[in-house]
Image (cartoon, helix red, strand yellow):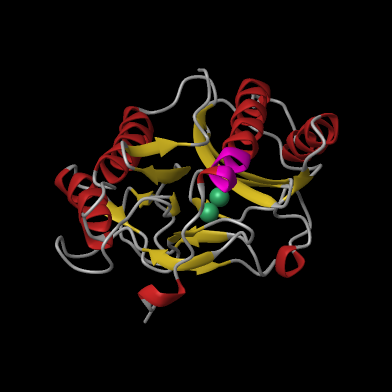
Amino acid sequence: MFSTRTIELKSKEEIAIMREAGAIVAAILVILSQAAQAGVATLELDKIARAQLAQRNAKPAFLGYHGFPAALCVSINSEVVHGIPSASRKLVNGDIVGLDFGCIYRGFYADSAVTVLVGAVSPLARKLVSVTQQSLSKGIEAMQVGARLGDISYSVQRHVESNGFSVVREFVGHGIGRSLHEDPAVPNFGKAGTGMRLSPGVILAIEPMVNAGGPEVETLSDGWTAVTKDRSLSAHFEHTVALTERGPEILTLGTD
Ligand code: MG
Ligand code: MG
């Protein structure tokens, strides 16, 4: 489905710019995570995101992308991804909140996501969030020079399913650079030892979306918000990761 010939390898100079873009996204996600408290409207988080971008001379990656109306995606509980910030939607104690955020800086994109816990969440929610974050780490560890793309997919899926959860099929990770979404697609499911061979200069946004119930999702009538079909909880983590001769380097690593 995706030809390896279309994969654009980035130079050290390009990676250096993307490292700056990634640091901006990471810093703002830390601020947003701290702001995501009970009683806060999700639109307020979007306002913070826009103000922080402006301060850092960066632009929102998602605003206007295929018509998306905000700088930030906020996806709560059974919402998987692409939730639209709203003045009337307030966070409540016990929510798990996916914050998916990207920027454009000096012509390059960075993309990252976290799922934060609001107040006291259920043991199931806590485990789901933890396993999803771990599965991202497993995927990143598999992104090595000479490994295959399928090794990443397999590592994520194995960790998720061995913990009794499921991976979403409809949405996948992606290459990233001068465009938000570049080849290759990076599914969160697949076979080890298959797919393109990874070489230095490959930059991927790896982003497991993990459901507590079944893997199926559907889109709400707003045309954007993806939710689990069975309305089980869903969590999402994402990093933009560069492959260098020394191995994977997370470009969107925060300080928290
Ligand atoms: Mg993202
Ligand atoms: Mg992404």
Q: Quadrant of residue 186?
A: bottom left
Q: Is residue 22 visible?
A: yes
- Which residue: 30% across, 60% down? 214
Q: In the figure, is residue 168 to the left or right of 150? A: right
Residue in front for this viewpoint, 251 or 50: 251
Q: Is residue 40 magenta?
A: no
Answer above or below: position of 12 versus 219.
Answer: above
Q: Residue at image x 64%, y 50%? A: 109
Residue at image position (85%, 35%) is: 54
Q: Nearer the viewer, residue 209 or 11?
A: 11
- Residue 66 spot, x, y in % from top left: 71, 69
Q: How many marks?
A: 0
Quadrant hosting residue 127: top left
**Looking at the picture, how far across and down is residue 165, in whole percent?**
25, 49
10 and 81: which is toward the camera = 10
Residue 75 seen from this side = no
Name the side, left or right, on which 127 lies relative to 39. left
Tell whether 66 sits left or right of 11. right
Q: Is residue 155 above or below residue 16?
A: below
| Residue 15 on the magenta segment | yes
Quadrant the N terminus occupies: bottom left
Indicate the position of residue 49 as horizontal and vertical percent values: 75, 35
Magenta stretch: dominant secondary structure: helix
Give x and y (percent) for residue 143: 29, 47
Location of residue 148 with respect to 205 vertically, above or below: below
Q: In the figure, residue 242 lies in which quadrant?
A: top left
Q: Residue furthest bottom?
A: 1
- Give the residues drawn in magenta, as a range: 13-18
Q: Residue at x 37, y 42 (%)?
A: 244
Q: Nearer the viewer, residue 67 or 102?
A: 102
Report whether 16 appears left or right of 122.
Answer: right
